[in-house]
Image (cartoon, grey):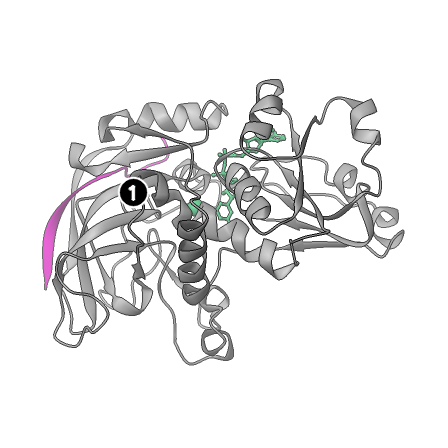
Amino acid sequence: MSTKVKAYGTSSTENPLEEITIERRTVQAHDVEFEILYCGICHSDLHQIKGDFGAFPPPIVPGHEMVGRVTAVGNHVTKFKIGDLAAVGCIVDSCGHCEYCEDGIEQFCDEGVTFSFNSEDKISGGHTFGGFSKTYVCNEKYVLKMPAFEDLASAAPLLCAGITVYSPLKHWGAGPSKKVGVLGIGGLGHLAIKIAKAMGAEVVVFTTSPNKVEDAKRLGADEAVLSSDAEAMAKYSRQLHFIIDTVSAKHDVNVYLNLLRHDGTVVLVGLPPEPLEIGAFNVIMGRRSFAGSNIGGIAETQEMLDFCFEHNITAESEIIPIDYVNTAFERLEKGDVKYRFVIDMASL
Ligand code: NAP
Ligand code: ZN
């Protein structure tokens, strides 16, 4: 059983997104249905509609930074009632019994996690459609309690961008007496500045965009460096404990490995489609690490939302109507957004 829902999607990498109708499963005993109020646009949405990660079964409806209000609950739902604020990020299902799920790191589920869009839906048998749509339905286990942020629209990007930087910042111990680098000031990077500062770290930003150098300081960075300025870069040689790399395209990570102190780590969260190369000496000298991190588990996502609410952290967003979405993707590709597009879903 399913319900027809208005959405925005495309059937091919060649075609722009347009209004379409999708089928959502009807609410099951443990499901929550919510009306989507706001949905952020992540660079991963762009990678996927461009086919950077391979072909997809059509149609694709992107969107995995959803905030909404509950409109229906299944008989066995205990966490939510109609009218509550609710939010969904990247994860909407996992096996629930492997060691990773039991440890609350569902993003690494042994049987493969179900993402909120463009993933096989084990319950309906079809594939999942994201948040560029009127409503969403999923098991309450994967629905977050959305704190009452004053600017709810700007809080939507926390659901992916926020957790993707919060999780590694916490894991690698960003905090007082730690010098943390943030590489790439886009949706993820600008939230990494705010979250790392709130954790008590000293933050240095590395950007390719001259116009973001001053802006990074407004966002809370202690220092900001234009990465093409070799002299300025040289000052940071062997200075940083940890660098979070949010760059979406191929780039030279060796430059940043050399900015690490001994035992320091560069953590890649960006998803350049092409492989990156690492020179052996850049890791063996100083016992440095090059690591990666993928979003965060459900419990940690809730913790991050509560942390951001307490510290008054939301994204700097440009709120757009749904029919602007194709232009928004073009601008995101050119790096022309400060710093996250958020769709007001009332416009659909
Ligand atoms: P975004 O808003 O487009 O920001 C990416 C930033 O990277 C740009 O603002 C730019 O910053 C920098 N950049 C872009 N192209 C570059 C190049 N050729 N060389 C150097 N720097 C470049 O994207 P986002 O939404 O923050 O996402 C960033 C990446 O993270 C994407 O690849 C996305 O798919 C990935 N992601 C991963 C996860 C995960 O779980 N690991 C989750 C969400 C997103 P400057 O202008 O400051 O240089
Ligand atoms: Zn994302």
Q: Nearer the viewer, residue 317 or 287?
A: 317
**Does residue 14 lie above or below 306 as drawn?**
above
Residue 54 in percent (x, y) is at 46, 46
Please tell me which residue is depicted at 20% across the width and 74% down the height of the picture: 78
Residue 336 in percent (x, y) is at 46, 22
Q: Nearer the viewer, residue 171 or 51?
A: 171
What is the quadrant of the N terminus in the image?
bottom left
**The CB of the residue at mark 1 lies under 8 Å from ligand 2:** no
Residue 69 in percent (x, y) is at 18, 52
140 vs 2, left or right, is: right
Quarter of the rendering containing residue 83: bottom left
Asked if residue 27 is among those painted magenta in the image, a careful observer would answer: no
What is the quadrant of the C terminus in the image?
top left
Q: Look at the numbered disc 1 and give the secondary structure of its residue.
A: helix
Quarter of the rendering containing residue 46: top left
Please tell me which residue is depicted at 45% across the width and 42% down the height of the picture: 44
Residue 132 in percent (x, y) is at 26, 41
| Magenta stretch, residue numbers | 1-15
**Does residue 327 lie above or below 87 as drawn?**
above
Q: Nearer the viewer, residue 286 or 282?
A: 286
Residue that label 1 marks = 152
Q: Which of 159 and 152 is in front in this view?
A: 152
**Does residue 119 lie above or below 56 as drawn?**
below
Q: Residues within 10 Å of mark 1 (few under 14, many from 20)?
A: some
Please tell me which residue is depicted at 29% across the width and 45% down the height of the picture: 58
**Does residue 268 lie above or below 234 as drawn?**
below
279 vs 186, left or right, is: right
- Callout count: 1
325 vs 72, left or right, is: right
Residue type at the position of mark 1: Leu
Please tell me which residue is depicted at 19% across the width and 63% down the height of the picture: 32
